[in-house]
Image (cartoon, rainbow, N blue to C red):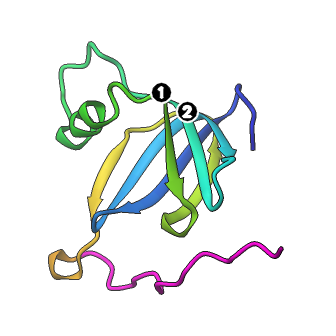
Amino acid sequence: MNNKKGIYKIQFHNQGKLYELYAREVTQSNMYAFIEVADIIFGEKNKLVVDPSEERLKQEFSSVKRTYIPLHSVVRIDEVDKEGVNKIIDSSADKGGSNVAAFPMPPPQPKN
């Protein structure tokens, strides 16, 4: 998965919302049961139309070099041809979202 020329779309759950980030680097972390995401891509700075969810993500990840996402939070990782808009999607069922939830389970334990 480590291809600096590729662009990856990462979807994961965080605090009841679905985050969608675009990044240039996604690797398996040295920390057990985490993926490492680096070089997060944000849209053009000179756009006239501002997306509030992307602005919130810019603020949340402005000083982040690398972020570590738990494997059980990841919905999917896609390698894409071009970047898109980073966004936060409300995943609560009462607002018209999906009523499908991930089954909570502990991460597998390494065998000694």
Q: Main secondary structure of the magenta part?
A: loop
Snapshot quadrant of residue 108:
bottom right
- The Cα atoms of the two marked residues, 1 and 2, are separated by 6 Å
Q: The C terminus is located in which quarter?
A: bottom right
Is residue 99 magenta-colored? Answer: yes
Residue type at tag 1: Lys
The answer to whether residue 16 is above or below residue 82 is: below
- For the point 60% across and 75% down, which residue is it? 107
Residue type at tag 2: Ala
Spot occupied by residue 38 in the image (x, y as percentages of width and height)? 55, 33
87 sits left or right of 109 in the view: left
| Closer to the camera in the image, 56 or 28 | 28
The answer to whether residue 76 is above or below residue 107 is: above
Boundaries of the magenta span: 97-112
Circle 1 packing at 10 Å, graded few (<14), some (14-19), many (20+), is few
| Closer to the camera in the image, 63 or 24 | 63
Q: The N terminus is located in which quarter?
A: top right
Spot occupied by residue 72 in the image (x, y as percentages of width and height)? 53, 70
Which comes sooner in the sequence, label 1 or label 2? 2
CB under 8 Å between discs 1 and 2: yes
Is residue 105 magenta-colored? Answer: yes
Looking at the rendered structure, the secondary structure element under dot 1 is loop
- For the point 68% across and 32% down, which residue is it? 6
* Residue extending furthest toward the top: 46
Residue marked by disc 2: 38
Snapshot quadrant of residue 99:
bottom left
48 sits left or right of 35 in the view: left
Mark number displayed over residue 78: none
Residue marked by disc 1: 65
Spot occupied by residue 30 in the image (x, y as percentages of width and height)? 69, 47
The answer to whether residue 73 is above or below residue 84 is: below
